[in-house]
Image: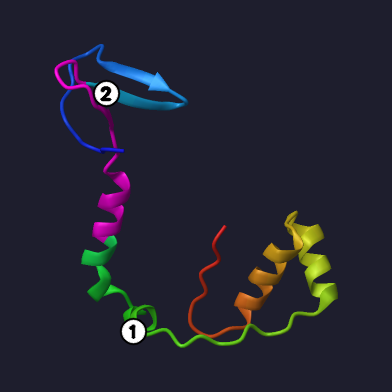
């Protein structure tokens, strides 16, 4: 798929399966319009990297084995916060680790 950013006249946008596409009537190619918000956010993070307190931990991570969490602690977290078992395990394991933890999902 060709992805491009370009100005379009009003009325040249069409919606297909939840996404907006721009039609160029002079060229028979469908071009998807993209948002720059993700690129801007990533660029801002990279530019500000020297000012982070944990820049060395981010650039040169030393992975540790996650500590074992007691099953009763997992059950308590699940009932208290309304989360599932993998989420509870990730949260409780990250509390016992040094540095910072990134929990995705």
Picture coordinates of residue 78 (x, y %)?
78, 61
Picture coordinates of residue 64 (x, y %)?
55, 87
Residue contact at pointers 1 and 2, CB within 8 angstroms: no
Say which element carries label 2: strand
Residue occupying image coordinates x 75% and y 54% = 82
Picture coordinates of residue 105 (x, y %)?
57, 57
The label nearer to you, 1 versus 2, is 2
Q: Is residue 100 above or below residue 47?
A: below
Instruction: Pick the residue in front: 53 or 39.
Output: 39
Q: Is residue 32 above or below residue 48?
A: above
62 relative position to 70: left or right: left
The residue where tag 1 is placed is 56
Give the crowd class for mark 2: few <14, some 14-19, many >=20 residues within 10 Å.
many
In the picture, the disc for residue 22 is: 2
104 relative position to 70: left or right: left
Residue 43: say if magenta. Answer: yes
Magenta residues span 24-44
**Number of disc labels:** 2
**Residue 90 image-quadrant placement:** bottom right
């Amino acid at each position: 798929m060709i992805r491009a950013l370009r100005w379009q006249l009003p009325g040249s946008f069409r919606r297909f399966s939840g996404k907006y596409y721009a039609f160029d009537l002079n060229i028979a190619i469908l071009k998807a319009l993209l948002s720059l918000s993700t690129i801007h956010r990533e660029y801002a993070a990279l530019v500000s990297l020297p000012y982070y307190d944990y820049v060395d931990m981010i650039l040169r991570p030393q992975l540790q084995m996650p500590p074992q969490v007691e099953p009763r602690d997992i059950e308590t977290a699940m009932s208290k916060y309304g989360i599932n078992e993998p989420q509870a395990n990730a949260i409780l394991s990250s509390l016992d680790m040094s540095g910072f933890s990134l929990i995705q999902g």
